[in-house]
């Protein structure tokens, strides 16, 4: 489906924000769902590229979808050259989306780099519904020059910055910062975690969630081929005893081994959002 580009601008370094008019679309996306975008006019690149819903802005009679993206290769390079008034071929929304639990009153969001893209939508959803009193946002990067979008995030919550090299904010990574805040009792006793970033960061957060006893949901950005369950390139191992299935997350593509000791999930169909404890991080990162 072709949608009109309203804006496509550089927001910082190699980060861009794309806005599309999706007023004609049938389905409204939920935070954590994604779109597959055709990133080229020829057969190279052949495969569509997945991007999360970043913001949804509805005004009288029109619906705008915003996508926040990082230029990293051929497809995103092409995307960054698209101009206002041009059309873009996108399909979606796909995936399960984050569960926005009504009972949750405190949320902690943890992002690294472009990981803030889907999390911002979570924060806005809570703010819109006025269900949450406290939103804490831990965000950062390797070096201070890579930090972006922190001013925008201050509109929805309290922001804590980190850099691996200590050039801005807390000196250390996201996991170090989270532990520091928990130990200094700078976060509420009860909260739900929402995280998006590299898999090794998510694994560290999973260990911390087990140790400190909080629940969490993570957005996995594994490599995708087809984007609709045919190529199996996005298979992700889950812990058999922890697989979470409920009305939000049916997981139609789960594959169990005959003895029930192994279970694989397809991120494009069952995910990309998972309970932080159900992913078999050791197997996933092996
Ligand atoms: C569900 C989902 C949601 C996503 N949402 C966003 C988003 O909101 N904003 C955004 O900027 N990106 C997002 N991504 C990642 C985005 O899809 C990739 O950056 C994009 O496909 C790269 O395309 P390319 O042709 O520019 O790069 P390629 O030429 O395909 O690859 C360039 C480099 O990036 C690496 N790369 C490619 N895809 C990924 C990936 N999925 N994870 C890690 N490294 C990758 C490659 O290994 C290579 O080193 C998402 C991915 C998934 C699976
Ligand atoms: S991307 Fe092909 S099966 Fe998920």
Image (cartoon, rainbow, N blue to C red):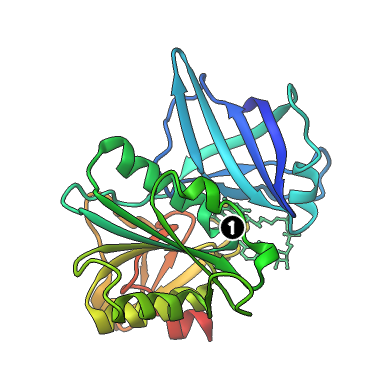
At a point 49% along the width and 38% down the height, the residue shown is 55
Residue 83 location (% of width, % of height): 78, 30
Mark 1 residue crowding within 10 angstroms, few (<14) / some (14–19) / many (20+): many
Snapshot quadrant of residue 91: top right
Dot 1: element? helix
**Numbered-mark total:** 1
Q: Which residue is mark 1?
A: 114
Q: Nearer the viewer, residue 24 or 148?
A: 148
Q: Nearer the viewer, residue 222 or 103?
A: 103
At a point 38% along the width and 50% down the height, the residue shown is 96
Q: Is residue 243 above or below residue 129?
A: below
Q: Is residue 43 left or right of residue 232?
A: right
Q: Residue furthest left?
A: 103
At a point 45% along the width and 13% down the height, the residue shown is 61
Residue 15 location (% of width, % of height): 69, 51
Snapshot quadrant of residue 58: top left
Pointer 1 residue Cβ closer than 8 Å to ligand 1? yes
At a point 65% along the width and 67% down the height, the residue shown is 144
Snapshot quadrant of residue 108: bottom left
Q: Is residue 42 left or right of residue 118?
A: right
Residue 128 location (% of width, % of height): 32, 35
Q: Quadrant of the N terminus?
A: top right
Q: Residue furthest top?
A: 61
Q: Nearer the viewer, residue 257 or 90?
A: 90
Q: Is residue 184 left or right of residue 168?
A: left
Visible residue check, residue 211: yes
Residue 279 location (% of width, % of height): 38, 74
Visible residue check, residue 258: no
């Amino acid at each position: 489906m072709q949608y009109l580009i309203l804006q496509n601008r550089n927001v910082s370094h190699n980060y861009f924000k794309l806005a599309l008019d999706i007023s004609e679309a049938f389905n409204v996306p939920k935070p954590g769902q994604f779109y597959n975008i055709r990133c080229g006019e020829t057969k190279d690149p052949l495969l569509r590229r997945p991007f999360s819903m970043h913001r949804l802005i509805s005004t009288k009679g029109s619906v705008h979808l915003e996508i926040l993206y990082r230029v990293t290769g051929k497809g995103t390079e092409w995307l960054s050259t698209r101009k206002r008034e041009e059309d873009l071929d996108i399909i979606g929304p796909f995936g399960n989306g984050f569960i926005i639990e009504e009972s949750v009153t405190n949320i902690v969001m943890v992002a690294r780099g472009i990981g803030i893209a889907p999390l911002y939508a979570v924060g806005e959803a809570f703010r819109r519904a006025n269900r949450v009193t406290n939103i804490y946002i831990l965000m950062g990067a390797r070096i201070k020059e890579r930090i972006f979008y922190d001013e925008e995030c201050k509109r929805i919550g309290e922001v804590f910055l980190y850099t691996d090299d200590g050039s801005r904010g807390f000196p250390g990574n996201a996991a170090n910062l989270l532990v520091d805040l928990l130990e200094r009792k700078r976060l509420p006793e009860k909260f739900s975690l929402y995280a998006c970033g590299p898999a090794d960061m998510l694994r560290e957060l999973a260990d911390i969630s087990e140790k400190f006893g909080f629940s969490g949901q993570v957005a996995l950005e594994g490599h995708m081929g087809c984007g609709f369950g045919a190529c199996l390139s996005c298979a992700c191992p889950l812990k058999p005893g922890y697989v979470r299935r409920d009305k939000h997350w049916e997981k139609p593509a789960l594959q169990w081994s005959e003895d029930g000791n192994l279970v694989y999930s397809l991120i494009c169909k069952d995910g990309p959002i998972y309970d932080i404890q159900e992913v078999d991080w050791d197997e996933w990162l092996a």
